[in-house]
């Protein structure tokens, strides 16, 4: 089965409002040349698998040339492909082949910072303080005697200060690793360069961009102290000097005009970690199309909390006419099979979330329930590669294998995000990840992943993969799920019940005990078996139609 080929009619133009988008962490997805690193050739060989899964689009994490100090979020050239992943010519072929299978292609753009190896930063280092080359970045003199103290007290995301001193004594700002100098978005040249990069890829046929750190690009030029003891990803109060500043909206309005200048609309999805209620500011007819719903990803798997997040999402976004989106996992968070197998199922901080006892059987049951819930909600949904196989977080990677800058920068206290980036999918390592099987994957795989391959999933009618396929097929074919209509119905404590369209019900049982199905309904698809008496088991979701 392939998806319909993209066309230019009105319905196709709004594909993004209800799209299921599959996230490809290219370094770990599929290795086409046997060097242990995923690549475009590997991805091209699996496009049919993705079309058959039933997704509408793929989002590819940064595939540009990069020293990989932060897994490719340190880009040294935005108009080329990392040699380990392939060539621009292969990228063109990938886009054409994906389109031929009805899959749209979304890339990742990283506008907040570049690699310290990017030509601009190298030029800035070679130029004098105050020069136009330095003004593309945020260089400042230090405080204290001889300027030997950082210009302010901000903390960087992976640990340490946000400032690094250059040999001539000036400091440069980096909200992330020192290898990721922040760009100065008050500089017209920076704005023009990114507009040109967007056009470069749109001209090559890409359908949209995921915008990295969309809420961090504009800084208060005064760079005032924050008075905080550690990095926080979200603005904690009004007027934060580097998160969620109103100035970013100007940038996104100009980006939207570029996207809309193409006959078939190109779309944006924001990675914007903002306080509840602020997300709509990023969305709407003259700004970005959609944004990730991190409140949903981070929410504990508890009925009341989920209901609150779902309500707030739908209500807030409706104000600007933007569709909701839903996501359970990505390349920055522990995989949800693992999270849901713990006593505390929500996401707190990387330091607090590591090393808890995990029941993977329970986590998998709950992950199935959460997936069916997510795919029954109105709007768009994101699937992180491997979640459709039921992959769990690899928490016992050897220290020597860890590559996330968080490990080093935290003084070996926070292990970081490598556990959700382990290459997947054969029978013996590398489990079909590499078609050649010569080099071992760049991160070691657990031995029991043999039972998690696409082949193993395929053979089992009750597998996670079959659940995802069935749910995605219903999303496409059931008219009640295709619209945006949604309403809550009464249900017992600890459970959720809602109706989509006219007569499709979704019941989620998080109450810890079996509950009866709603009256006068019949099951269409369930995330797990019902009890012998036809009750909905704990930690199970069922889609039903009215009799
Ligand atoms: C985003 C990315 C993350 C990266 C960071 C810096 O949060 O998802 O992987 O480390 O930005 O670019």
Image (spheres, grey):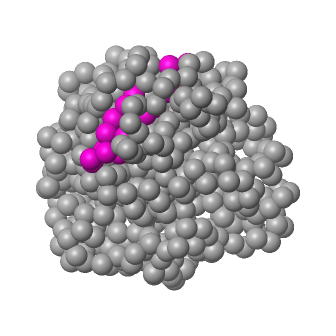
As displayed, is residue 117 above or below residue 215? Answer: below
As displayed, is residue 40 above or below residue 402? Answer: below
Q: Residue at x 44, y 19 (%)?
A: 494
Kindly indicate the quadrant of the structure image that contains residue 233.
top left
Q: Can residue 158 be seen at all in this image of the molecule?
A: yes
Quarter containing the C terminus: top left
Percent position (x, y) of residue 486? 27, 41
Number of numbered labels in the structure image: 0
Kindly indicate the quadrant of the structure image that contains residue 268.
bottom left
Kindly indicate the quadrant of the structure image that contains residue 10.
bottom left
Horizontal side of 289 relative to 141 (left or right) equals left
Q: Residue at x 75, y 43 (%)?
A: 401
| Magenta span: chief secondary structure | strand
Q: Is residue 506 covered in magenta?
A: yes
Percent position (x, y) of residue 126? 43, 57
Q: Residue at x 59, y 28 (%)?
A: 533
Q: Residue at x 60, y 18 (%)?
A: 343
Horizontal side of 286 relative to 268 (left or right) equals left
Q: Can residue 221 be seen at all in this image of the molecule?
A: no
Percent position (x, y) of residue 462? 66, 48
Q: Is residue 126 covered in magenta?
A: no
Q: What span is in magenta?
A: 496-512
Q: Nearer the viewer, residue 185 or 204?
A: 204
Percent position (x, y) of residue 291? 31, 46
Q: Nearer the viewer, residue 22 or 334?
A: 22
């Amino acid at each position: 089965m392939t998806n319909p080929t993209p066309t230019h009619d009105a319905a196709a133009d709004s594909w993004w409002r209800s799209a299921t988008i599959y996230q490809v962490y290219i370094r770990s997805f599929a290795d086409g040349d046997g060097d242990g690193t995923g690549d475009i050739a590997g991805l091209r060989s699996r496009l049919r698998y993705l079309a058959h899964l039933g997704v509408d689009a793929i989002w590819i994490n940064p595939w540009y040339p990069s020293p990989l100090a932060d897994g490719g979020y340190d880009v040294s050239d935005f108009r080329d492909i990392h040699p380990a992943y392939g060539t621009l010519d292969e990228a063109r072929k990938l886009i054409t082949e994906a389109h031929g299978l009805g899959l749209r292609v979304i890339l990742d753009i990283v506008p907040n910072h570049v690699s310290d190896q990017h030509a601009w930063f190298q030029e800035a280092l070679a130029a004098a303080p105050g020069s136009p080359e330095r003004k593309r970045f945020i260089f400042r003199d230090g405080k204290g005697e001889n300027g030997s103290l950082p210009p302010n007290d901000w903390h960087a995301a992976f640990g340490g200060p946000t400032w690094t001193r250059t040999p001539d004594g000036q400091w440069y700002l980096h909200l992330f690793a020192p290898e990721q100098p922040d760009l100065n978005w008050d500089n017209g040249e920076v704005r023009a360069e990114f507009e040109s990069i967007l056009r470069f890829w749109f001209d090559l046929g890409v359908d949209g961009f995921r915008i990295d750190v969309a809420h961090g690009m504009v800084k208060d030029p005064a760079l005032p102290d924050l008075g905080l003891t550690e990095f926080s990803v979200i603005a904690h109060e009004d007027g934060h000097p580097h998160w969620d500043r109103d100035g970013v909206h100007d940038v996104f309005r100009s980006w939207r005009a570029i996207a809309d200048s193409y006959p078939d609309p190109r779309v944006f999805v924001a990675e914007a970690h903002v306080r509840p209620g602020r997300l709509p500011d990023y969305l709407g007819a003259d700004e970005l199309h959609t944004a990730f719903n991190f409140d949903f990803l981070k929410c504990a798997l508890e009925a009341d909390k989920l209901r609150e997040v779902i309500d707030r999402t739908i209500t807030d976004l409706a104000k600007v006419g933007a569709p909701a989106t839903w996501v359970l996992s990505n390349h920055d968070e522990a995989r949800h099979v693992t999270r849901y197998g713990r006593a505390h199922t929500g996401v707190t901080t990387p330091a607090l979330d590591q090393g808890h006892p995990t029941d993977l059987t329970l986590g998998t049951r709950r992950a199935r329930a959460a997936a069916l819930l997510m795919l029954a909600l109105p709007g768009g949904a994101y699937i992180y590669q491997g979640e459709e196989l039921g992959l769990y977080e690899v928490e016992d990677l050897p220290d020597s294998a860890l590559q996330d800058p968080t490990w080093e920068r935290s003084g070996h206290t926070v292990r970081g995000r490598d556990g959700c980036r382990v290459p997947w999918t054969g029978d013996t390592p590398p489990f079909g990840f590499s078609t050649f099987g010569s080099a071992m994957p760049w991160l070691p795989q657990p031995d029991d992943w043999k039972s998690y391959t696409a082949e193993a999933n395929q053979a089992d009618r009750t597998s996670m993969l079959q659940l995802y396929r069935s749910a995605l097929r219903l999303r496409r074919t059931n008219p009640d799920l295709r619209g945006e209509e949604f309403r809550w119905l009464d249900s017992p404590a600890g459970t959720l019940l809602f109706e989509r369209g006219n007569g499709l019900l979704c019941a989620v049982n998080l109450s810890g005990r079996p509950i009866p199905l709603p009256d006068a309904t019949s099951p269409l698809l369930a995330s797990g078996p019902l009890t012998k008496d036809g009750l909905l088991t704990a930690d199970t979701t069922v889609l039903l139609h009215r009799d």
